[in-house]
Amino acid sequence: MELETYSQIKTSVKRLLNIDLTYYKDEQMRRRLDSWLVRSGAPDWDDYFDRLRGDQHELSRFRDYLTINVSEFFRDLERWMALRGQVMPALLEQARKVHPLRPALRVWSAGCSIGAEIYSLAIMLDEMAPGSTHYLLATDLDRGVLLKARAHGPYSVDEIRNVNPQQRATYFEQTGAQYMLKDSLARRITFKEHNLLNDLYENAFDLIVCRNVIIYFTTEAKAELYKKFYQALRPGGILFLGGTEIIPRPGDIGFQNVGISFYRKGGQ
Ligand SMILES: C[S@@+](CC[C@H](N)C(=O)[O-])C[C@H]1O[C@@H](n2cnc3c(N)ncnc32)[C@H](O)[C@@H]1O
């Protein structure tokens, strides 16, 4: 794809979808766009954007494609086991100093996609600290995925393959081959539309989970986000990243690497 074409696409995408592709890795995004155009059957981008303007359905398919929203419960199970075994107990211990019987955490799933990540956290916290009322925030820029997240399903067998049988029985209702998360758990989550690159962040989080989101961003955008996450955590709070998302020199920001994928904000 010519650079000039890419630059025109970026302008149209910003106008139509409010997504700024400048922050996404260039080469990867251009390859994805090329293959999308071929699949769409449109002769060129002008033609495709004309079609998009009058077709809400196609617009949302395009948005889904650009933002890559594949997700599942307890994705990358080994890391979630580390969260459960090594990270969460310390966070709950800290919270018990304030509320000994009902330790309450502030948790944010940033780039939550279909909600599988925040519901995994809700399940884990319900098992580890039953009866507590946590603040569980889940955000994404994609309205389409937030609809499914808010509706708490339906989820496919593949999406819940890492949910153990006991959790399935306790937290899900099965309808045919699909699974719905039970209302009682879903009600505990606050979902919001939020663009990590442009919008303001809430703060004082004990735990921020941002997995498989940052990989698509440029080095500069990543560096900016790590700083913003640092500010959004309380001292001693933890940032939980995806398997390939590594902060190059965490100490420069004030983070300490405390296990694969986990970064702790200093100060407590
Ligand atoms: C691959 S999914 C990851 C979902 C989940 N965190 C996981 O690991 O299973 C990436 C999500 O990031 C969202 N996303 C991409 N760019 C974003 C941005 N600038 N702000 C907020 N969310 C974004 C996408 O819409 C998508 O739902």
Image (tube, rainbow, N blue to C red):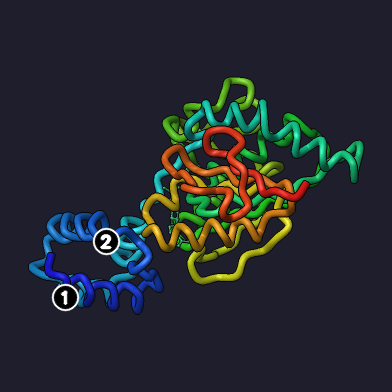
Which residue shows up at 58% across the image and 40% down it? 257
Q: Quadrant of the N terminus?
A: bottom left
Give percent across and percent down for residue 32: 23, 55
- Crowding near the residue tagged with mark 1, few <14, some 14–19, many ≥20 C-alpha atoms within 10 Å: few
In this rendering, the answer to whether 238 lies above or below 126 is: below
- Crowding near the residue tagged with mark 2, few <14, some 14–19, many ≥20 C-alpha atoms within 10 Å: some
Which residue shows up at 16% across the image and 71% down it? 3
Which residue shows up at 59% across the image and 57% down it? 229
Query: At label 2, which amino acid type do we have?
Result: Asp
Q: How many marks?
A: 2
Give percent across and percent down for residue 38: 12, 57
- Confirm if mark 2 falls within 8 A of ligand 1: no
Q: Residue furthest left?
A: 43
Residue closer to the observer: 59 or 199: 199
Which residue shows up at 23% across the image and 73% down it? 9
Residue closer to the observer: 29 or 226: 226
Picture quadrant where residue 227 is located: bottom right
In this rendering, the answer to whether 206 lies above or below 96 is: below
According to the image, label 1 marks what residue?
4
Task: Give the number of the disc on residue 26.
Answer: 2
Image side of residue 190 versus residue 131, left or right: left
Picture quadrant where residue 59 is located: bottom left
